[in-house]
Image: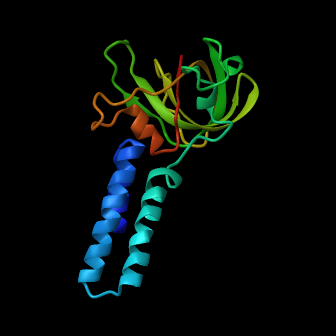
Amino acid sequence: MALTALVLGAQSLPSQATVVVAVVLLITARFCLIRLGITQSRATALALMLPLLLAWACWWGQPRPGPLDPVRLLASAGSFDRSSRLPLRSSLEGRLLSDSRLLPDSRFVADSCRALLAVNRINGLPRHGRSEVQLRPCPQLLQQGWRIRVHGQLRAPALGPHSLLPGPAERLQQQGSWSQFWGD
């Protein structure tokens, strides 16, 4: 039951479909437990745990950006306050959480690099969260623990080319980051 709840939590289903699947699983789990010889009251109690596990996997167990995360400054279709939008060019300060990695890029003469950054300030204002910094061109490889200030533009990472294929947004979400900062 727990494995089924976790698998369903990893799928992107609309909430109505999730409720229907949870009810079907609840009935199936109760029936299977009774067939295994467990009393009806215990089978019902165990089967009622399934919706709780499913809710945890779908909603409560998923990471979310904090209130001061850099993604809160991005302008999106009505989801954030318009007064908090960033100007086209911004300044980002923070500490590197990983060494930078070189990325060959055919659009530029020099290679670009990226690294995960623990954000301290954006445009001089305190912020706390994570953002991936991409430098184009990369002047030198940056190392974990360095404190840096970068000028550029904060952006939302691109989604995957298909709902079943991961993209930068999914990769960064696993690292607790919901934004990218393209610096020069």
Residue 92 visible? yes
Residue 146, compared with residue 106, is above or below; it is: below
1 lies above or below 21:
below
- How far across and down, in percent of the image, does residue 110 sit? 39, 16
Residue closer to the observer: 141 or 181: 181
Rendered-image quadrant of the C terminus: top right
Say if 165 sits above or below 1 in the image. Answer: above
**In the image, residue 5 lies at what x, y percent?**
37, 61
**In terms of image quadrants, where is residue 111?**
top left
Relative side of 70 to 24, left or right: right
Which residue is nearer to you in this view: 80 or 95? Answer: 80
Residue pushed farthest right? 125
Q: Quadrant of residue 129?
A: top right
Residue closest to the far front? 40
* Place of residue 35 in the rendered image (x, y in percent of width and height, measured from the top left): 23, 82
Task: Say if residue 3 shows up in the picture.
Answer: no
89 vs 33, left or right, is right
Q: Residue at x 33, y 31 (%)?
A: 160
The answer to which image quadrant residue 158 occupies is top left
**Which residue shows up at 75% across the image and 25% down it?**
124
Quadrant where the N terminus lies? Answer: bottom left
**Residue at 36% over, 59% down:** 23
Left or right: 122 in relation to 133: right
Q: Nearer the viewer, residue 41 or 176?
A: 41
**Residue, x 28% and y 81% (percent of image)?**
34
Q: Residue 151 in the image: state x and y as whole percent.
A: 61, 18
Q: Is residue 107 above or below residue 53?
A: above
Asked if residue 74 lies left or right of residue 106, the reply is right
